[in-house]
Amino acid sequence: MSSDTTTIRRDIYSISRLNREVRTLLEGSLPLLWIEGEISNLTRHSSGHWYFSLKDEAAQVRCAMFRNRNMNIGFKPDNGMQVLIRARISLYEARGEFQIIAEHMEEAGDGALRRAYEILKHRLQAEGLFNPDHKKSLPPWPRCVGIITSPTGAAIHDILSTLQRRSPLLSVIVYPVLVQGTSSAAQIAAMIHTVDLRNECDVLIIARGGGSLEDLWSFNDEQVARAIYACSVPIVSGIGHEVDFTIADFVADQRAPTPTAAAELISPNQIEIDSRLQQIQSRLVQYLQNRLTQSQRQIEWLTRRLPQPRRQLQNWMQRLDEIQLRQQTVMRFALRQHGSHLQQFIQRLRSVSPKQMLTQHQQRLGYQTERLRRNMTQQLVQKQQRLSNLAHALDTISPLATLQRGYAIATRNDDNRLIQDAAQIHKNTLVDIRLAHGKLHCRVESTSSDNLK
């Protein structure tokens, strides 16, 4: 081999160049990914950046989320929390460590539901299911109201109590369904179709008490939304609390913030109607009395202007008496006629008003007043004794009394769900232990299953 043979040149990488090219390769090869895992080793740097690990049962990866991204997060992440992040893959060149850069973070489970909720909401809105022109007006004087809800929940109790207080003569039909669970949405949609086919109520309330997004998910179901849209009966939704909005609320003809508000919305207040009727009657009587007084004063004025000759005076007096009698007859007739119209109006309202019962009670009121005064003291003593007995019975069955005997109640820290089985809990899960006095905030180190019969 000759001495002038060209020496082979080697492309030698420095560590910095190697890490830089590997980072470029990783970031250019993979798009933004959705990644789910559990947070551990969370550090919040004074700069505002977050550094943590994301792990599952078999592996973990280092993560970074910079201040300009994490300042928009609507919750406070912590170790042990299950999250869903939108991230890009990268490499930290200074240490040659594989890592992911989080662009967005949300709580796992609830975040997925919210994405599905928004997707369905935008799709149904684009189809016109929320169009105000399609919404039906509520009947001002319903005779029968239907209620689709759980027969054992608090919502049905609140609705029935409100209807009984405001419109005791209103007919009510309860259509029982499940309001939570995998089959509840199909049940609700089928019951709406049934109500529409039976055509036995003037307005329909769809109600449920408050809960989490997952608890209310049956009312975010597409088949429920389409059943509401297709129903010919006006529908009022009273689902959850004031801050809860479901797909059913947007499709319904009118939305009430709570089940109680839904009942108030569709029920006329009979007490206010009766009070208004009494005012109208009082004004009518006062008007007729004023007219009669004016006529009498006019007659008296005309009487004083009569000529002095006795005979002519007597004739005019006789004629005035006749005129007065006719006037009184006309006024009595007018009064009877107006009274007859008023009675007809009252009779028409009796079908929807407790007027007759109220009249009977008013007639008995004078006789019962003195008796009420004598019995008041005795009734007060009886009620106080009953209250004492009920308080004692309530204390007997109170879960607080059970806690006083040494028992405890364990709930999950993240969603406050009751823990009944150790299999529901994993290691490092945060739990709250409710004692008779105070709470214990604990982290699970291990679990075991004991089958106690």
Image: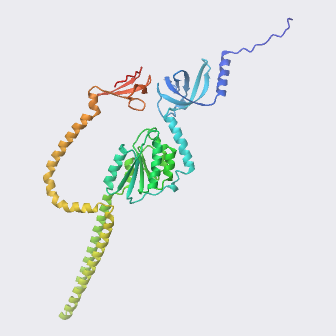
Q: Specify whether 344 is left or right of 364.
A: right
Q: Position of residue 409 (x, y in %)?
A: 34, 29
Given residues 94 and 102, the one toward you in this image is: 102
Colour treatment of the image: rainbow
Tell me: residue 3, above or below residue 230: above
Residue drawn at x 48%, y 29% is: 77
Position of the N terminus by quadrant: top right
Given residues 149 and 416, the one toward you in this image is: 149
Q: Quadrant of residue 423?
A: top left
Residue drawn at x 23%, y 89% is: 319
Residue 245 visible from this viewpoint: no
Position of the C terminus by quadrant: top left
The extreme left residue here reads 374
Residue 149 visible from this viewpoint: yes
Q: Specify whether 295 is left or right of 54.
A: left
Q: Where is residue 121 in the image (x, y as percent from the top left)?
A: 53, 45
Tell me: residue 314, above or below residue 47: below
Residue drawn at x 49%, y 50% is: 227
Q: Specify whether 312 is left or right of 230.
A: left
Residue drawn at x 30%, y 75% is: 337
Q: In which quarter of the image is residue 22?
A: top right
Tell me: residue 293, above or below residue 305: above
Q: In which quarter of the image is residue 85?
A: top right
Given residues 406 and 189, the one toward you in this image is: 189
Q: Where is residue 363 in the image (x, y as percent from the top left)?
A: 20, 63
Q: Position of residue 67 (x, y in %)?
A: 54, 29
Tell me: residue 440, above or below residue 284: above
